[in-house]
Amino acid sequence: MDVVLERLRRLPPSSQHALKLLACLGNNTDIPTLKIVLGATEAEINENLRAAVQSGAIVSRGGSYQFLHDRIQEAAYALVPEALRLTLHCQIGQRLLAELTEAEITERIFDIVNQLNVGVLPGFDPDDKARLGRLNLQAGLRAKASTAYASACHYFMFGLALLGDDGWATAYDLSFKLMLERAECELQRGKLDVSAEFIERLLLKAESRTDRTQAFRLKITLQKLHGEMALAAQTAIECLKMFEMTYPEHPTDKDVQQEYEDLKRRIGSRSIESLIELSLIDDPEIRAVSGILLELCLCFYYVDSTLFDILVCRIVKLSIQYGHSEACTVGYGLLGASLGPVFDRFDDGERFAQLAVAVSERHRFLAQRTGSYFLLHMALACTRTIDEAMRCLDAGNQAAVETGEVVFACYCATYRIMNLLARGEPLDLIWPETAKALTFVREKGYMPAKSILLARPSASSRR
């Protein structure tokens, strides 16, 4: 590297300056970015880098400049005095922020944040830290949407570290969101112990019922992944107590029938399909309650099927009263899967399950698409052919790949095997599919699905 560094030092000062900035930006940088960072025209950039190109340090390709080798980039970066590196990275990030439009900032958020994170200066005031924290949140959410959970965790972690303990007083909403997203991403990438630590911290820090509900939701999901359904149900009950919600402790079949009759009265003369026109819930607390009701409902699927049926009806009634939410979308699907076996209303069940998919698609409830398609598969299994039902599993799997959803993704993998068996496929074909599904649910850490695949008796048997 010393030889390469000496060669670069022989270049004209203007070329050395341009190479330093190019090295800070990475191995390959386009000319529009260099124009912003160097504050020069394209002609001036080409002139400044001409000697570097002639020396073989970099090449010009398709409107960008690229280092020929990582060692050359390292040598160019070594031209920057160590004491000035933080300042230079900070200046690059600030210039990009100042010159790019909001849409361009969104598109290039990683380039900007990666510069600013390296260039955090000791003199940053709380406003500077909060702004950079918001940018890290934006970058983390972008990475999370691409299921790049490790990268997303890095950005959330950096934002939290930047704000520090003081951030809970000076930027509470931002600190809470960063920690919430970090906890969820750790959960989605299977780091359950790390996620559990952040969830407990969230429950201690939360200042509103809505925020506490979000933390409770993650805690319930974590407990379900461990197969602790009764414990998850108790956690959901603890959360609902904040909203003074009650339900029958020892419900009977008569209670279920009364709940369903009340639901039908509320729907009235409207068709099931027309419910798609309901507005969205605009009250954050009602939206939070619907989410916890759903979690409790899913827990009681394993613990108390009668109470499950009552809660399903209540979720849908909540939607009819206040509008659609992410949780109510899955509630439609759960009702659809239950109406046939419980109330002998198989056609209505299919229609409600179709409604769940339609609502998730219309309002882009991406995280709920996997569950909606899985539950449509459950309803179609009672009214259509196995092949038609399995196509819903394929759609659910694709949605899970795009969003990183865990619980229903594991059920899609599990029920695919059950459908192959029901279709009478040869065991030689089913065995490798089963091994693949088992590997998947083990990676996700979802114990109930693992028990089903291993044919172990569990609380998942129902009806």
Image: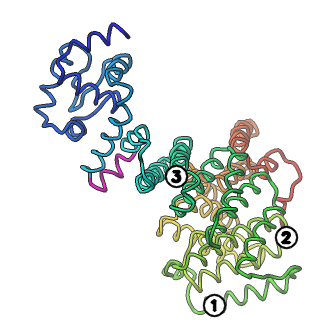
Q: Residues within 10 Å of mark 2 (few under 14, many from 20)?
A: some
Q: What predominant SS class does the magenta segment belong to? A: helix
Q: Check contact, mark 2 vs mark 3: CB within 8 A.
A: no
- For numbered disc 1, what is the local secondary structure? helix
- Residue 460 point in image, percent of width and height: 82, 59
Q: Is residue 220 above or below residue 270?
A: above
Distance of mark 3 from mark 1, alpha carbons? 48 Å
- Residue 45 point in image, percent of width and height: 16, 30
Disc sitting over residue 266 in the figure: 1
> Quarter of the image containing the N terminus?
top left
- Residue 348 point in image, percent of width and height: 65, 78
* Residue toward you, 393 or 380: 393
Q: Earlier in the sequence, mark 2 or mark 1?
A: 1
> For the residue marked with disc 1, what is the amino acid?
Arg
Left or right? Give the position of 52 relative to 211: left
- For numbered disc 3, what is the local secondary structure? helix
* Residue toward you, 146 or 67: 67
- Whether residue 350 appears in this view of the structure is no
Left or right? Give the position of 407 relative to 77: right
Q: Is residue 83 above or below residue 441?
A: above
* Residue toward you, 430 or 126: 126
Q: Which residues are magenta?
A: 101-109
Left or right? Give the position of 207 relative to 11: right
Q: Is residue 262 above or below residue 463?
A: below
